[in-house]
Amino acid sequence: MENIERLDRYLRGAMDAEEKAGFEAQLAKDAELAKALELQRDMELFLRRKTQRETLQKQLPAIGKEYFQTTQGAKVITMPRQRRLLLIAASLAAAIALFFMVRWALSPSLFDSYAQYPPLALTEKSAGIDWSQAETAFNSKKYTEAESLLAQYVAENPLDRQALLYLGICKMEQDKLHEAQSIFQGFTPDEADLRDYADWYLALSYLKAGDKTSCRQALQQLSNTSPFRQQAADLLNKL
Amino acid sequence: MPTETHPDQQYITALCTGNEALIRDIYAKYARSIQIWVTQNNGDVADAQDLFQDALMAVYDRYCGREFVLTSSLGALLMTICRRKWFDRLAQKTREEGVRKWEENRYNEEDSEWEAAEAAIMHQKRQECLSQVFKLLSEQCQKMLTMVAAGAHSVEQIAAELGFANANALYQSKHRCTARWRQLFNEHFKEI
């Protein structure tokens, strides 16, 4: 009790200079007293923040719902039968038209001619672990093997966003286009250089999917400083 | 160690003050990469959301109400806290594999991030334990401690409202409540 009173007086600034100096000298050599003071500070902090902390605990789940979403969680709206039939017919017509347009305009070679990647270099970045296999696999276009190794690397080095970009490329090359697009879309404007690459590869992923409209939109949205602007302009002319 | 204030300090201030627009910015900037990482490590989207929220609370408990200078990016700190917490959860679910991965990653982290994450998690555990055992105090103790800490009324006013003879009697009671709270904390709290 005596100690609690002293701790309380110290934290309230109720000690005079002499008592305070004595208390601080004792704190410096008494680990138990220092520990007790730390707990007293935490208790006071808890009391001061109690209401605000509880408010934040309620606020975060509500905001989080909007930023963490699964496709399964999306609402399903049932349409009237006639509208459904019309929609199916329209979709079929669009799919057939798209199929012929894609065959005509987007031959696989168009994707291949633009899908050129700088070599992957992980070895110099890794401490102790040899990631040269991932490099070799990627640089020799063995994308299945490279994907598996890069997934491990990214799991262990989540801050290496460049490696994540290459993981996206591996997925794109194996036609895991949604997964690839999800990675490319995850780059933020703060990551300016990598974002330029991610935006370009996103456009290529649409090209690979045969989605001409999205490809064109993605190309048009490349930043003014993107190193791919010339290639994007060429590709837009061919679409 | 750099000592300049990092621009991300504004986000921590936003957490401390409940600024919803900037809290949304935090989610917009970092939720996606946490979700990708968690789903690549045996978790689902719900796990990622829960983990991210838990990490934000750890940041709140570490920094809000204290003097601090943020010297590295909030994104890196959040990711390290999430990783640390996720490996703990894995360790609880599948002991061997989880612990192995946790140990592997423990030594791969950059020291400063790792230390900052550890400190945040420790502060969060202490605050959560304080919260848990606070509820075990009498209603009178809870009310008095909260009113005194809020500082909205003078000690004399609080003493009168709670039926104490004077401020001194209130302080004596406050010290007894604090001693009980402290005792409960020491009985319940487990170090990491």
Image: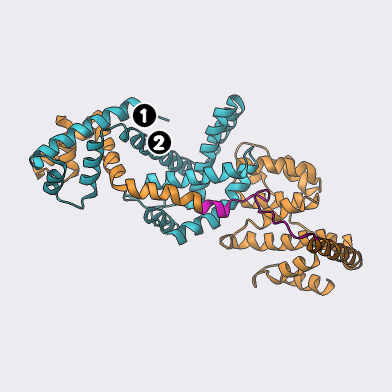
Q: Is mark 1 on a helix, strand or loop?
A: loop
Q: Quadrant of the C terminus of chain B?
A: top left
Q: CA separation, marks 2 and 1?
A: 8 Å
Q: Is mark 2 on a helix, strand or loop?
A: helix
Pointers 2 and 1 in contact (CB under 8 A)? yes
Q: Give the range drawn in magenta.
A: A63-81
From the rendered image, report the letter of the chain displayed in cyan: B
> Residue B124: where, in percent of width, then height?
40, 40
User: Toward the viewer: A129 or B95?
Assistant: B95
Image-quadrant location for residue B62: top left
> Residue B173: where, in percent of width, then height?
16, 35
User: Toward the viewer: A59 or A12?
Assistant: A59
The residue labelled by disc 1 is B189
> Residue B172: where, in percent of width, then height?
13, 35
Based on the picture, tell me whether residue A70 belongs to the magenta stretch: yes
Image-quadrant location for residue B132: top left
The residue labelled by disc 2 is B125
Q: In this view, does A39 lie above or below B113?
A: above
Based on the picture, tell me whether residue A124 belongs to the magenta stretch: no
**Which amino acid is tagged 2?**
Lys
User: Toward the viewer: A219 or B129?
Assistant: B129
> Residue B83: where, in percent of width, then height?
54, 40
Mark 2 belongs to chain: B
Q: Can residue A159 be seen in this view?
A: no
Q: How many labels does the image show?
A: 2
* Residue at image coords 79%, 64%: A83
From the rendered image, report the letter of the chain displayed in orange: A
Image color mode: by chain
User: Toward the viewer: A184 or A23?
Assistant: A184
Magenta residues, dominant SS class: loop
For mark 1, does the 10 Å Cα neighbourhood hold few (<14), some (14 to 19), or many (20 or more) residues? some
